[in-house]
Image: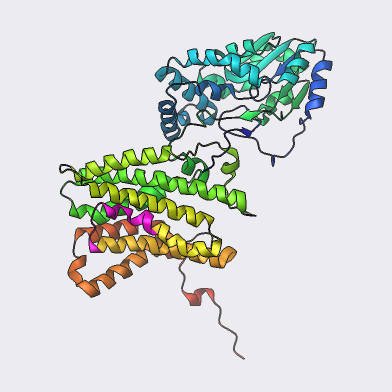
Amino acid sequence: MPSVPLETPTSTETSDSTETSDDPPGDFDVPVELALAAIRSHDGPIFVDLDETLYLRNSTEDYIDSARPRLLALILLRIVDVLKPWRFTGGEATRDVWRVRLIRFFFSWTSIVWKARIPALARQFTNANLAAALNQASGPLYIVTVGFKPIVTPLIAALQVRTTRVVACDLTTSSRRRGKLACVVDALGEDCVRRAVLVTDSKEDLPLLKACARGIRTLWPDARYRRAFADVYLPGQYITQIKHPGEHYLRRAVFQDDYMWWILSSIALTATPVAHIAGLFLLLVSFWVIYEMGYADNDMIANNYEAQPALTRAFHEVSVATPMIQPWIWSMVFAIAGIFVIRWPAAPALRDFILWTLGLVGTSLWFALYNRANKPTRVWMYGVLQFARTTIFTLIVPVLPVGAMALAAQVLPRWAQYYVYRLVGKNWPTQARFGIARLGTFVLLAITLSIALGRGVLMNWTTLALLGWSLFRARRELAGIFSSSVRLERVTSKAPRE
């Protein structure tokens, strides 16, 4: 499948946000030509931002991108993004401090690689027009940045721009918390700030823009914000950063729903429950690596062929690698490990590997056909995808009859909701109560099963566990129904008698 472009325009200096065209213009916004003219004519101090301004990329991200091996460094950063230790040191402003310091600690050779990359980066990403204007100006030049001194100092030296002084942050959280204005005032004094012209691209520099004699905010057409390791593949990134950003989708929809149903419907039939749970987790990862490829392909097809594609904003702003071959390698490694763990202490059969591989290939092919079908056709194909997502593990492990009913209760409401969404469209409520639908479907299917096979088929702790987890997942929806329930005669007035 084609990949998301690795570089996207931006105009922000921080490493975790991007500028978009729908941002309202500010009082300081100036076209490129006028900004260059203002620099040449200003008789006084000149302040210029570094990232995405004088240097057309982000120095912090490019430094982190110098860590080797890249995959291990990316995994470290993703773990840190989950833990978010900057919550305790001043919030998002200190995020890059944690990222850089951890990279320097675990990959201490990164600074050597960074300095080796600087000459090529400087040649390619120096803002030549801005550099020429700065070299022609008469006033002292101060490069002011919230980038980090150990990173930006050798980079600025390679930009070949006359520089009076560099004002940058040290690798402490306090400098990032104080902000650029405070750092510049401390370093250069209030009088220097009041006489200066500032050229930046970032709206976060608004306090400094207001404090200077003239503040200029310019978006440079060649500037690119590129996240570190944007071209390194890691499973789960497309779902968490593009398909369902900020939704905790893996935890809520994959682990709390799919994975728990896999466990509860089958664990009663194993003699090694710990190995069973671990093996199912490995198989879950194996499956979702391939299923995620279907999501990425779905978005690409929508972007290329649909008039009004339902894409997240992150699709156009975030860079995530989506290669063709690497996901299959990851999936097969997790599959082999999962099957060995599930079958332990016995040896797995060749049939297990063949069935699982066929299941993955079939799911991938069906997802590809689904993505290329028109929307009315997708209504009927969607159920197969949900069936594969919910039951593929049964190719390897057996389930109890009541477990099979629970899996069916997972598939049917999802399919029904998609069916109504496609046929009813905008009239479909935005808060569909899937948890209650699944709970009701499970209860009805379980009762139906008991009618056919006798009540004894439900008299086991698997039934109780599945029912309990269904109630737990639907707890907020049930609470909402109970809290909003009112007797009809209390809200409907009687018609007046004639």
Q: Observer-nearest residue: 324 or 172?
A: 324
Q: Where is residue 380 in the image (x, y as percent from the top left)?
A: 47, 65
Q: Please tell me in which quadrant of the rendered image residue 54 appears.
A: top right
Q: Position of residue 150 (x, y in %)?
A: 54, 13
Q: Observer-nearest residue: 450 or 98?
A: 450
- Give the left or right position of residue 223, taking residue 62 as reference: right
Q: In this view, does 359 lie above or below 32?
A: below
Q: Position of residue 166 (x, y in %)?
A: 64, 12
Q: Please tell me in which quadrant of the rendered image residue 395 appears.
A: bottom left
- Give the left or right position of residue 87, taking residue 305 as reference: left
Secondary structure mostly seen in the magenta stretch: helix
Q: Observer-nearest residue: 82 or 310?
A: 310
Residue at (40%, 49%) from the top-left corner?
252
Magenta stretch: give its range.
Answer: 387-401
Q: Does the magenta stretch include residue 395?
A: yes
Q: Observer-nearest residue: 156 or 492?
A: 156
Q: Is residue 167 magenta?
A: no
Q: Where is residue 477 in the image (x, y as percent from the top left)?
A: 42, 60
Position of the C terminus, as image quadrant, is bottom right
Q: In this view, does 206 lie above or below 375?
A: above
Can residue 152 be seen in this snapshot?
no
Residue at (60%, 13%) from the top-left corner?
119
Give the tally of numbered discs: 0
- Give the left or right position of residue 458, taking residue 196 as reference: left
